[in-house]
Image: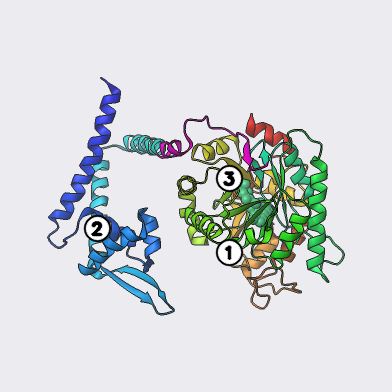
Amino acid sequence: MDITKKLDDILVSLFNSVLKMEENAIKNSSKHNLSITEVHTLAAIGAGKAKTMTQVAARLKISVSTLTIAINKLVDKKYVNRFRIPEDRRIVKIELTEEGACAVREHEEFHRKMIEDVLSELNEKEQGILVQSLDNLHDFFKRQRVKAIKGDAPIGLTPLVLGDLTIPVPIFQGGMGIGVSLSGLASAVAKCGGVGVISAAQIGFMEPDFYTNPKEANARALARNIREAKAAIENVPGKGLIAVNLMCASRNYDEFVETAVKAGVDMIISGAGLPTALPGLVKDSKVKIVPIVSSARAAALIVKSWTKKYNRVPDAILFEGPKAGGHLGFKEEQLEDAQEHFYETIMEIKEEIEDLPDCPLIVAGGIYTKEDVQKALAYGADGVQLGTRFVTTEECDVHPNFKQAYLDAGEDDIIVIKSPVGMPGRAIRTPFSDRVEAGRIPPEKCNRCLIPCKAEEAPYCITQALINAAKGDIENGLVFSGSNAYRAEKIETVADIFRELTS
Ligand SMILES: Cc1cc2nc3c(=O)[nH]c(=O)nc-3n(C[C@H](O)[C@H](O)[C@H](O)COP(=O)(O)O)c2cc1C
């Protein structure tokens, strides 16, 4: 038997058969006058809340103008309602009519029945083999999409050139506040050829005037940490870069950008909101600027906005998925779905930035082992960022009790908490997080560090809780961590991790 031919025949005929069955099912339904494409459009709108044209077009992977033509017909046929929302008359939303919802239900029923019929012919073991084989095949086809963009180059951690700077080993260490990634950890990572990231989040927390003059205390500590890290790697051959992580939500963001540039940082990585103003703030300095995004849509938005306003594109894009630590760029109810589509999203972002050959994609969130690194690269990443794995290192700047909390944690101890900034955050359960879950802990003092946080309503002061943990008071602290924190078994060195990931 020619297995190549047989498999080819099966795949082509399988695809055609399913399509034909779908078409017949739709044709035989006396009630509906719809084409298969129209049914798929209705399914993308879904029976839930009304959606914007952009949301539905993104789901179908078509342009809004193509969708508009399809929606015009569906409105005429009375399967879709189109309306402007009263709060903002510029926004058009679409929703299914009762008839549209009925057509979608029928279509779902067809799919359910088809799968049920297939499974009824197989025993449990055969069902498992079928799912596994199809999953592998699906994975293969997805990776072909990446190959189409990246070519046949071998998958690996190859050096990245960003204009006048080179990253010998494209492993970024995530910026971790408060006080987790400072000059010590960042310089250790850059010495191994990676990108060491200093977190600017309330970095002045150890300064004597932090509570009386937070702006100056933070700026002073930020500049000092950048200078210390740069000095530590000055004569190291094969060194990487020193970056800072600045959250858009921080008060005095603009001043921190200026401080970081003046102190000679190589790169500014910015998230917790889209850093739309960043190119204007770094002006014509040579510092590299990297936005953090959580979807292909956000990547497209930032590229479009920077190009239009500043004629500049990002020097790299950092995609942070839902398994990351600290504040997450997803709503709590989106986390599961976002994880299911993590690798798909890597590919989508890579496709989105395909036309920007000098803009590598760095992927973060749940990357812990060499296999995780390889998988992210196989799906289109050009580099990776790890946060959690670097916490349990000798060089990590945080208090040893914080690292011990990682070593002691079990999988069930990793929780998602509500942050006063309005985003979910991932952390290790502590007596403090239990108290927060039980009720509000009114903040004692507030230096208005985060723009979206309102002390009068905040469930607790996140800055104080993170400072307590950074100083080793785990009882009264919030220990941010990624979902892999429970995997830490020992304290390693940064060089150990680089050896393992690059071997
Ligand atoms: C303790 C801790 C603190 C963090 N603090 C920040 C932060 O201040 N700003 C930020 O953008 N990301 C922060 N992160 C996210 C990391 O930079 C990184 O992207 C993420 O944790 C990667 O996922 P991983 O931890 O699964 O490797 C933090 C993560 C941890 C574990």
Q: Which mark is residue 38?
A: 2
Mark 3 burial class by Cα count in 10 Å: few <14, some 14-19, many 20+ = many
Amino acid type at mark 2: Glu
Mark 1 to mark 3 CA distance (whole Å): 22 Å
The residue lying toward the viewer, choosing from 363 and 235, is 235
- Looking at the image, is mark 1 or mark 3 nearer the viewer? 3
Residue 313 horizontal/vertical position (percent):
57, 52
Which span of residues is magenta-colored? 142-164
Which of the image's four quarters has the N terminus?
top left
Mark 2 and mark 1 in contact? Answer it, CB < 8 Å: no
The residue lying toward the viewer, choosing from 18 and 442, is 18
- Looking at the image, is mark 2 or mark 1 nearer the viewer? 2
* SS for dot 3: strand
Query: 78 above or below 37?
Result: below
Residue 320 horizontal/vertical position (percent):
57, 51
Left or right side of 419 for 152: left
Q: Which of the marked residues, 1 or 3, is nearer the chain's N terminus? A: 3
The residue lying toward the viewer, choosing from 48 and 287, is 287
Mark 1 burial class by Cα count in 10 Å: few <14, some 14-19, many 20+ = some
Amino acid type at mark 3: Ile
Left or right side of 256 for 414: left
Which of the image's four quarters has the C terminus?
top right
The residue at the point 45 percent across, 48 percent down is: 348
Res. 78 visible in picture:
no
Amino acid type at mark 1: Met
Snapshot quadrant of residue 122: top left
The residue at the point 28 percent across, 61 percent down is: 42
Query: 75 above or below 189?
Result: below
Please give the residue where the numbered disc 3 appears in the rendered image.
362
Please give the residue where the numbered disc 1 appears in the rendered image.
423
Q: Residue most toward the right?
A: 208
Res. 242 visible in picture:
yes
